């Protein structure tokens, strides 16, 4: 999908959907943060949060960045959507003033940072939103260039098995919103699609409509492993999600897999 500037195939969320995402879906990464902090403590060489730089790739509305900043990390948040970044910046304004946070409007497949990172992380199947394996490989290469020696690249992906759960229609209705999700995925296809639409309560008890078409590209774990090694990563591991302390020798059997690459 091309962005408004005509240069990217990566999906970028619009202004109305950013409101819904910030309100209802940003907590996915926040809930995962404690487990990830424990993982970094065990796996990151010379682990010292106050001296470590974390790149939050596809940072969205900044909830995960906020959790990691609160734990002492320096965080560089990167997202293609300026609407999502507005929430991330506002949520982490105090850390920006301290010089411990930075938020950049960049494509994940063309990102760059000024500071070498100890870890690059991308959560909530954000990398499934890339158009193809070529775009995903660009992320692997750029993350390798951006990390310190023995640094980490960590990300979760929906598998083909997991994307089968997208099929169907769901409706969630509260006094504050009505959210309708229509998803479709056929086994053997390269993408799953979902139309997320509905109404959100605004100031003055009015409701505003929103609609966003999203897709997830199917990436085989064999191809992910191959392209990570080809990009220079020394070791590649597949873990369960959210139980990331559990290794998986059959990642395609999981609905969601957590991938760890070691430089």
Image (cartoon, helix red, strand yellow):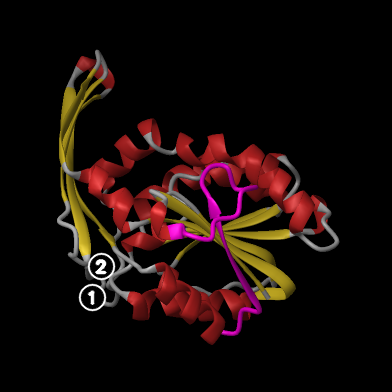
- Kindly indicate the quadrant of the structure image that contains residue 229: bottom right
Where residue 164 appears, as percent x and y from the top left, is 24, 48
Question: In terms of secondary structure, where does tag 1 sit?
Answer: loop
Whether 239 is among the magenta residues is yes
Find out whether the residues at labels 1 and 2 contact each other: C-beta distance under 8 Å. Answer: yes
Magenta segment, prevailing SS (helix, strand or loop):
loop
Residue under the point 54% across and 34% down: 31
Please report the bounds of the magenta region as a residue range. Answer: 231-251
Is 227 situated above or below 216? below
Q: Which mark is residue 3?
A: 2
Question: In terms of secondary structure, where does tag 2 sit?
Answer: loop
Residue 178 lies left or right of residue 8; in this view the side is left
Q: Which residue is mark 1?
A: 6
Is 248 situated above or below 69? below
Residue under the point 35% across and 50% down: 83
Q: Is residue 211 visible?
A: no
Where residue 69 appears, as percent x and y from the top left, is 67, 45
Residue 256 lies left or right of residue 186; in this view the side is right
Where residue 257 appears, as percent x and y from the top left, is 47, 54
Label 2 crowding class (10 Å Cα cut-off): few <14, some 14-19, many 20+?
some
Whether 250 is among the magenta residues is yes
Q: Nearer the viewer, residue 10 or 159?
A: 159
Label 1 crowding class (10 Å Cα cut-off): few <14, some 14-19, many 20+?
few
Residue under the point 51% across and 45% down: 62
Quadrant occupied by the N terminus: bottom left
């Amino acid at each position: 999908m091309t962005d408004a500037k005509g240069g990217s195939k990566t999906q970028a969320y619009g202004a109305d959907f950013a409101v819904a995402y910030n309100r209802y879906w940003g907590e996915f990464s926040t809930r995962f943060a404690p487990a990830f902090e424990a993982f970094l403590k065990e796996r990151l060489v010379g682990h010292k949060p106050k001296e470590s730089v974390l790149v939050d790739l596809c940072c969205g509305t900044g909830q995960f960045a906020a959790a990691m900043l609160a734990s002492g990390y320096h965080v560089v948040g990167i997202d293609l959507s300026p609407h999502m970044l507005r929430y991330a910046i506002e949520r982490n304004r105090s850390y920006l003033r301290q010089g411990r946070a930075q938020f950049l409007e960049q494509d994940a497949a063309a990102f760059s940072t000024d500071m070498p990172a100890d870890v690059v992380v991308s959560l909530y199947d954000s990398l499934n939103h890339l158009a193809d394996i070529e775009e995903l490989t660009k992320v692997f290469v750029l993350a390798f260039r951006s990390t310190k020696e023995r640094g980490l690249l960590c990300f979760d992906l929906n598998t083909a098995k997991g994307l089968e759960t997208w099929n169907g229609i769901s409706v969630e209705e509260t006094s504050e919103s009505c959210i309708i999700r229509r998803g479709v995925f056929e086994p053997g296809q390269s993408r799953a699609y979902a139309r997320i639409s509905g109404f959100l309560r605004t100031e003055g008890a009015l409701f505003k409509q929103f609609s966003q078409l999203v897709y997830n590209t199917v990436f085989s774990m064999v191809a992910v492993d191959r392209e990570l090694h080809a990009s220079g990563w020394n070791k590649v591991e597949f873990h369960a999600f959210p139980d990331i302390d559990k290794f998986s020798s059959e990642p395609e059997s999981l609905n969601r897999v957590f991938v760890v690459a070691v430089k």
